[in-house]
Amino acid sequence: MSEKFQAVVIGGGPGGYVCAIRLAQLGLKTACIESRGSLGGTCLNVGCIPSKSLLNLSEEFHKVKSLASKGIEVGEVKLNLDKMMKSKDKAVTVLTKGVEFLLKKNKVTYFKGHGSFKSKNEILIKDDKNKEIIIPNRKNSYCNRISSSFITRNRNR
Ligand SMILES: Cc1cc2nc3c(=O)[nH]c(=O)nc-3n(C[C@H](O)[C@H](O)[C@H](O)COP(=O)(O)OP(=O)(O)OC[C@H]3O[C@@H](n4cnc5c(N)ncnc54)[C@H](O)[C@@H]3O)c2cc1C
């Protein structure tokens, strides 16, 4: 792996992917590393979005069940948890793929794997098959912590 980046963001959650897109928009050659297998972090994959999807569906179920007392009779209302979970999964997939599209559109290179610093100027990515990719940075790079994501940015563009 000989490709060099001016900015590398470890973590593709709301902190990381937004940061990576902005860095690319500002003209830096940027990469984003995410170990989860899909972008969007806790929020899109297991937090905000899935919880709100299930909350909304639960509320709709409750509303339909209480319609009879208001004079609207719809017969027996049953909850199909499998279908509910599939609907939630669909919302998550659409949004995580949407983030992937945004990275691509903004020319951010997306690496799937676990990122760590091999040295001050090298970042190691280990994928799920334990394959290793090393991203070398030029000398004089520095690190900033933003949200739960780490950035290494090159001073000499
Ligand atoms: C159930 C639940 C509901 C929530 N609801 C809301 C809500 O309604 N509104 C709201 O504003 N917030 C909500 N949140 C909080 C929200 O999810 C977080 O604030 C947000 O995800 C934080 O974003 P982040 O990018 O800082 O971190 P994360 O979303 O945690 O993203 C960090 C990413 O970095 C990856 N990562 C970490 N280390 C490495 C590494 N070394 N290499 C590669 N990848 C790495 C992780 O896999 C992860 O995907 C909720 C959280 C939960 C758990």
Image: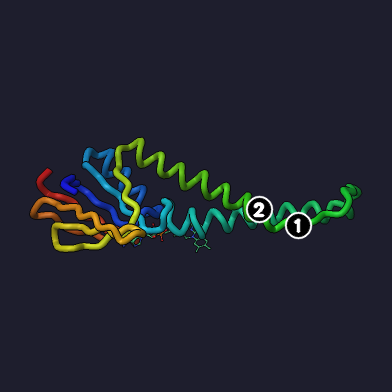
Q: Quadrant of the C terminus?
A: top left
Camera-side mark, 1 or 2: 1
Q: Amino acid at mark 2?
A: Asn
Q: Which mark is residue 3?
A: none
Residue drawn at 32 percent across, 43 percent down: 21
Q: Counting other residues with Cα less than 10 Å from the Cα at mark 1, is it few (<14), some (14-19), or many (20 or more)? A: few
- Ligand 1 visible in quadrant: bottom left
Q: CA distance from mark 1 to mark 2?
A: 13 Å
In which quadrant of the rendered view does residue 69 lie? bottom right
Q: Nearer the viewer, residue 17 or 147?
A: 17
Left or right placement of residue 69 versus residue 62 in this view? right
From where the camera sits, is residue 86 visible? yes
Q: Which mark is residue 56?
A: 2
Residue drawn at 24 percent across, 51 percent down: 8
Count the labels in the image. Answer: 2
Residue drawn at 28 percent across, 58 percent down: 131
From where the camera sits, is residue 147 visible? no
- Residues at badges 1 and 2 in contact (C-beta under 8 Å)? no
Q: In terms of secondary structure, where does tag 1 sit?
A: loop
* Residue 79 locus on image (x, y percent): 75, 57
Left or right placement of residue 96 versus residue 82 in this view? left
* Residue 117 locus on image (x, y percent): 21, 62
